[in-house]
Image (cartoon, rainbow, N blue to C red):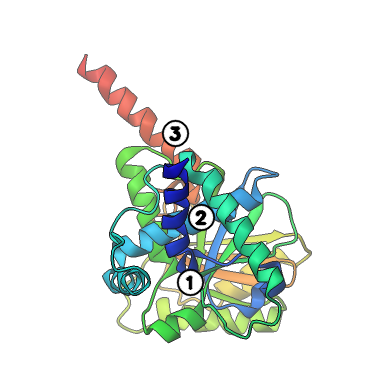
Amino acid sequence: MESKNKSKDKYKKKRKYLGANNPKKRKNLHEIKQGIYVACDFGTEALCVLECFVLFNQVVEKIYPEFKKENLKENLNENSNENSNENLNENLNENLNEVSESFENELAELRGNKGDDKKTLYLFHSIRMGGHGVVFIEISDEYLVQKKIQISSEKIVQEIMYQIEKTGKLQTKHASRIVPFSKICYADMETILLNAKQIVDEYFNPKEKLPINYALDVRVSMGKFDKKQLIKNVADLIDAKHKVNLDNPDVVFLIHIFKNSCCFGILENYTRFAKFNVRKLSEKILSQKENEKEKEK
């Protein structure tokens, strides 16, 4: 019992920069700047949000030393006797129930403190998607501005994929696909093309940019949109020196429309990482390792 309470206390120290899951503060998807789309098993959306908060926080601390330094400083300010460098969650599956309970307690506290004017900033926020089997985690621009740090959704997800490729082990129980998006806007054709042109001009069209093989991956979920026309319009923006390669592109320009929101991502290693499907990538790596063992016999 004592160890369980101790574990909860450790989590409570870090929860303020793990993530916020308060329904009253949720934004529309097109109102945020960047984030991470996660597909999950039906009925596990809430648990998926929680495990993503934990995993993404661990990855950010690993690849962004300035973020870890800020977190350690906050922990030391709260309790100078606490070992703030200790791993938050050594075994995600074993501790997920405790994490879930802690978040439920926090939400209860938030609902009970309606008159509290103090605003706590979180790095991660869950965004309501309006569908089953999907969640979206915002990387808070307000948090990054206040802390004066820069964090990329692509780098977070690429690091997760590298670790799966290295070990074959899944780091999530409920998530099946994890995709970063660096830009989000309202989903009408004019606004989409305006934002797409900004991305194309930055990534594809600089004069010094060498020719690359690319693919357009346009998806429409929970809504209606002229997909073929959108593909044509976006393709017309890209310099002709770059060639379409659907089988093994150097980069994939992903455009995903969810109802009235459009998300953009420039993704490298798309084929290599099984289109960012963590389960398929894990299966592929484990199968390769098994085949290597068989050859050695």
Q: Nearer the viewer, residue 127 or 2?
A: 2
Identity of the residue drawn at 28% across and 59% down:
83
Q: Nearer the viewer, residue 236 or 163?
A: 163
- Marks 3 and 2, the one that precedes in the sequence: 2
Q: Residues within 10 Å of mark 3 (few under 14, many from 20)?
A: some
Q: Which residue is mark 3?
A: 283
Local secondary structure at mark 1? loop
Residue extending furthest front? Answer: 2
Q: CA distance from mark 3 to mark 1?
A: 31 Å
Q: Position of residue 261 (x, y in %)?
A: 68, 72
Residue 240 quadrant = bottom left
- Marks 2 and 1, the one that precedes in the sequence: 2
Q: Which residue is mark 1?
A: 123
The C terminus appears in which quarter of the rendering? top left
Residue 49 marker: none
Identity of the residue drawn at 56% across and 55% down:
102
Amino acid under label 1? Leu
